[in-house]
Image: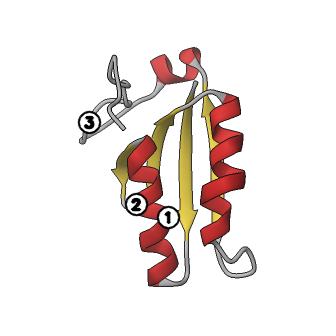
Amino acid sequence: MLWLVCYDVADNKRRQKLVKLLEQRGQRVQYSVFECPLTEKELRHLLEKRWLKVLNLREDNLRIYPLDATAKKRTLVFGGSPPYEPPDYVIL
C-alpha cells in the first residue's frame, strides 16, 4: 500500500525531526508531502512509536491518505517524478 503523508508542523525543530523520519520510509514529492510504501501494520507502528512522538498535536497537523493500486494508477502528475515505486530491497 502506498500512503500519502502530508504535514504542517509549526516548529522548525519538530519539522526537521519528522522530515528525517519520513525520509527513512518514503520519498518526498512536495515540500510537506511524502509518498510512503508501507503495510498498514508498519504505518500504525511508525505512527505510534516514532512520528506522533515528535509532534505537538495542538499546533501541528499530520494527515495520511491511503493510495491503493487503483488510485496510484490513476494519479496524475505534472512535473516532478511519477508516484513512488519502492526498491526491491532496503538496506537499514
Identify the residue at horizontal 62%, vertical 27% (top origin). 39
Q: To which quarter of the image does residue 44 belong?
A: top right
Residue 32 seen from this side: no
Q: Earlier in the sequence, mark 3 or mark 2?
A: 2
Which residue is under mark 2? 20
Which residue is under mark 1? 18
- Is 42 on the left or on the right of 37, as rendered? right
Residue extending furthest toward the front: 92
- Is 73 on the left or on the right of 7, as rendered? left
Identify the residue at horizontal 43%, vertical 62% (top origin). 19
Closest to the observer, 50 or 34: 50
Mark 2 burial class by Cα count in 10 Å: few <14, some 14-19, many 20+: few
Position of residue 43 relative to residue 18, above or below, is above
Q: Residue 45 shows which numbered tag? A: none
Cβ atoms at labels 2 and 1 below 8 Å apart: yes
Cβ atoms at labels 3 and 2 below 8 Å apart: no
